[in-house]
Image: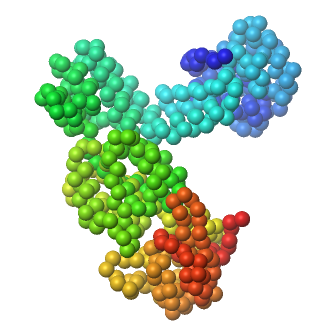
Amino acid sequence: MAYFPFFMEIKGQKGVIAGGGQMALHKVEKLLPFEPELTVIAPDILPELLAKEGLTCVKRAFQDADIEGAMFVIAATKDEALNAHISRICQEKQIPVNAVDNLTNCTFLFPALIQAGKLTIGISTAGGSPQTAALLRSRIAAGLPAEIDRILDYLASLREPAKQHITNGKDRAAFLKDIASVCLEEGRIFGQEDTETLLAQYSRKDSSRFSQRIQKCEEDHVKQETQDHLLTWQSVHKPGVTLVGAGCGSYDLITLRGLQAVRRAEVLLYDDLVDERLLEHTSESCERIYVGKRKGRHSLSQEAINQLLIDYGVTGKRVVRLKGGDPYVFGRGGEEVLALQQAKIPVEVVPGVTSAVAAPSAAGIPVTHRGVAKSFHVVTGHTAGEGDQLDVNLEGLAKLEGTYIFLMGLSHLEQIVRRLEAGGASPRTPAAVVHVHADGKVEAVVGVLQDIVEKTAVYGIQTPAVIVVGETAGLGLNP
């Protein structure tokens, strides 16, 4: 039997919790944000409960009279017989009761809860699998905009102005639906000027046709006045480009914000080093463009990619540039941002997990470690137009303490080793070369400066690889 999810106002209402342990604490933490008058009753009460504001704690045994006047009761003691007794007397008085870990003694259940401002989402499996409810809660929460509470406050504030400015009920409903859809999709609210523009647009005669703009705008037979509405919407729906760091290796290292951007993308330009499983999160209508770049086999020049971003950026579509690692760590993200800014196209950058940290970590190598390495230095192992000579002061780097991390440097490994030793690095300094596959599989060669070149050649490590030099490379923290 399923349970109907009533949403009730409990602010200021009396609630009683019998029990002072972890289960009581768990229930209290769920309830307190809704501001009931909660009383915890138990001979022994956790310090965490005693320290909570807005909570009354009574250190004594439960008494039947404690439930008088309560809107709800929770039986959370370790005594199953006492919990059953509390359930029975509550049901006799028709007071809703929840008894922990005993479905038959409950008249209401606690859902897996998402609460953010005005938003409350409760998920229940009728006690069948609380773990499933918790997993679903996590998935739903991951898809919510970061500022959902602010968005809901904004949408609530539009209801009265919409009544005043849009007299036609269907047009008013279309306005509220459309603006809610865009706010949730883009994770933002509109400014006052843009809001007033949209209110005025929807208040015009036949503006209900505007609510169909998304489906109709690409059809050749769309009427001119609908196109006019579309232009007005696009004036507040700012075009732009989002650079997203996909992280290093497996697709699940992308950030939540990055994944949300990928899911909303109408155009996606992606790199060679991106786990293609991320592409499965795009919509079916998303235009996906491969612009893979890797040393020795560029498919497009950086200038061509910049121009593509500009060309798509002015269309008003949601454009995402998906890059391996972090866009600003030797990812040429700065060049793309400058090109877009010069073209006056709004741009946002979502950071990613850089391979400079993620690849060593995957191989059990921390880039810092107390008492071993107080700093780490990230260095490019490849610079444009350098030929065979690496234009980096490696001899000076060798005089610095800490861990040295080289990106895109596999083809220069021998030169890196030779020049670090020339700068004073000991040939016995631990070193490692790490390659992380898109599926998360890790290949690593560990040695010291004097043998790492030979070991890497024998093992056959492929690009892209991260080179780590320093004492932390020899810690071997992976089991």
Q: Nearer the viewer, residue 323 or 377?
A: 323
Q: Which residue shows up at 36% across the image and 34% down it?
A: 183
The quarter of the picture where residue 79 lies is top right
Left or right: where 425 falls relative to 104:
left
Residue 351 visible in rendering: no
Left or right: where 35 falls relative to 350:
right
Q: Nearer the viewer, residue 49 or 299?
A: 299
Q: Nearer the viewer, residue 331 or 199?
A: 331
Instruction: Name the residue furthest left.
Output: 224
Instruction: Name the residue furthest bottom.
Output: 422
The quarter of the picture where residue 66 lies is top right
Left or right: where 402 falls relative to 93:
left
Q: Which residue shows up at 49% across the image and 75% down it?
A: 406
**How far across and down, in percent of the image, does residue 20 sit?**
78, 30
**How far across and down, in percent of the image, does residue 307 sit?**
23, 59
Residue 408 visible in rendering: yes
Quadrant placement of the N terminus: top right
Q: Which residue shows up at 40% across the image and 84% down it?
A: 390
Q: Is residue 19 above or below residue 385?
A: above
**How far across and down, in percent of the image, does residue 60 sit?**
84, 25
Quadrant placement of the C terminus: bottom right
